Amino acid sequence: MKRMTITEVDIVNADVTVYAVWGLDTNGNGDPDVLETKYDVIYDVNGGNALSGPATARVLPQNDYTLSLTGPTHADTAGGDKVVFIGWTDTKDETIYEKDDTAPAMITEVDIVNADVTVYAVWGLDTNGNGDPDVLETKYDVIYDVNGGNADGPATANVLPQDDYTLSLTRPTHADTAGGDKVVFIGWTETPDTKIYSKDDTAGPVTVTKIDIDGNETVYAVWAYDENGNGDPDFGEEKYDITVHYVDRDGQPIGTPTTEIYTVLSGAWTLPSAEIPSIPNYVFRSWKVGSGPLTVNTTVTLGNVTADMDVYLVYGKDNSPGAGDGIEDFRVVRNWTKADGTALDVSLPSVSGSWNVGDYFTKGPAEDVTIPAGWTYQGYKVNGGALVAAPATPNEAVTVEKGDFTVTYVYARTTYNITVHYAGRDAVSLQASALTQAGLDFPRCRTPGRAHLSPTMVMPSPP
């Protein structure tokens, strides 16, 4: 409460006593605060939440007045990022500062001279959610070491301190090996691992996709082979077992060992020729998958492996290993017969050469021989079996399995249609079923209107 002070008194007929009155001088200027003019310090939240800042302060004139430490608040951005208070400035700045910006100079004190003073809140993003403005925090480097790969990994990232920082999804690449094998990226590790992992590894690297940032951090690429070329590391892919069996032509196991198991990836697979074993007294000539058909070929290739499978390498017996040829020969006897089984005269002997086990015997019925005129090829028999009907072009293929065997080519008489004309009559067709080897060479008609035919032909009565 302000009291009236006096500067004069009346002296009449008695002593007069006056009393000193005291007041605080908090600003130290020698004047009692109670008598001084006061000014307002106004805190403008500058886009922050209304009423969240300090209340306006009524203060005395002074130098270095300490501003309030109470920080106002701000709504999150439209993208959900936190916005936090950086400090106060004496000029308005509506920028919301990000981590890579340079923050303006903040003030913590003002001089109150002879007027009100307004200070303004300054704001910054807080993307790591630790309550501190990103722009004021220390940043650290995340370094991506490609660890022997090509120089195409992610660039070094300058980031804020935080937990569970998500590493880059950019995948570096690696040169092929000297042997031509593909090498692909597995992931990132926190310690160097120079091994290139293969499909046969049972334990792999411990990769990370997130790390805690409390200083500079380095992560290392780790690599694996990609044998099947699908762009994915073989390590961790589905694998299949191909069991290769070594058998004779009767399907009986041979060799030591009698099987070999190959663990492979999906896709095409070829058995390396160097891994096909040589088995004494046998020679490899053909193979098959499971109970499928025999492939007469020494290249074992599977088109698309999608499951475990059994492959049989079929070996033929070599009865004369000392000969040095490594192949057992079998004789193929060729015969030419009539439909009734009697021999058909040809100009070459019926025995014609030798063929190796597993070879294709592809000589056609008219190859190397002269077939008499008037005979038509019907098909062939193997070792007296059922007749295999002839195709349009008579060139059959028979696979040499084991042992000598006979191919018999079967022929029948060629048949013709003969049209006999009677004077003044319609034509009548006759079929000649038995001609001489010279063909249609029978006596011609010498008397007009009559025909003289061979004894084997029958003339019907005129209609």
Image (cartoon, helix red, strand yellow):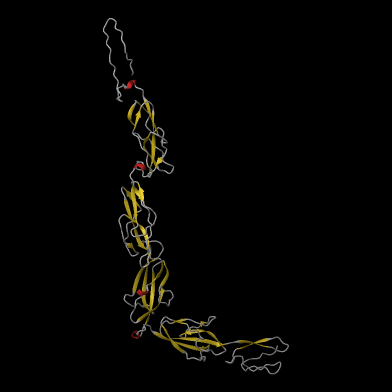
Question: Left of 431 or right of it: where is 286?
Answer: left
Residue situated furthest right in the rendering: 424
Nearer to me, 185 or 23 = 23
Q: Residue at x 69, y 86 (%)?
A: 427
Report x, y in % for residue 448: 71, 93
**How many circles with numbers are drawn on the protein?**
0
Residue situated furthest top in the rendering: 13
Question: Left of 274 or right of it: where is 390?
Answer: right
Q: Quadrant of the N terminus?
A: top left
Q: Residue at x 28, y 12 (%)?
A: 18
Nearer to me, 126 or 255 = 126
Report x, y in % for residue 460: 67, 90
Picture quarter containing residue 76?
top left
Report x, y in % for residue 252: 36, 78
Q: Residue at x 35, y 31 (%)?
A: 110
Residue 71 vertical position relative to residue 273 in the rendered view, above or below: above
Residue 10 vertical position relative to residue 93 in the rendered view, above or below: above
Nearer to me, 78 or 34 = 34
Report x, y in % for residue 213: 32, 48
Question: Left of 204 or right of it: where is 408?
Answer: right
Picture quarter containing residue 293?
bottom left
Residue 257 vertical position relative to residue 109 in the rendered view, above or below: below
Q: Quadrant of the C terminus?
A: bottom right
Nearer to me, 196 or 409 = 196
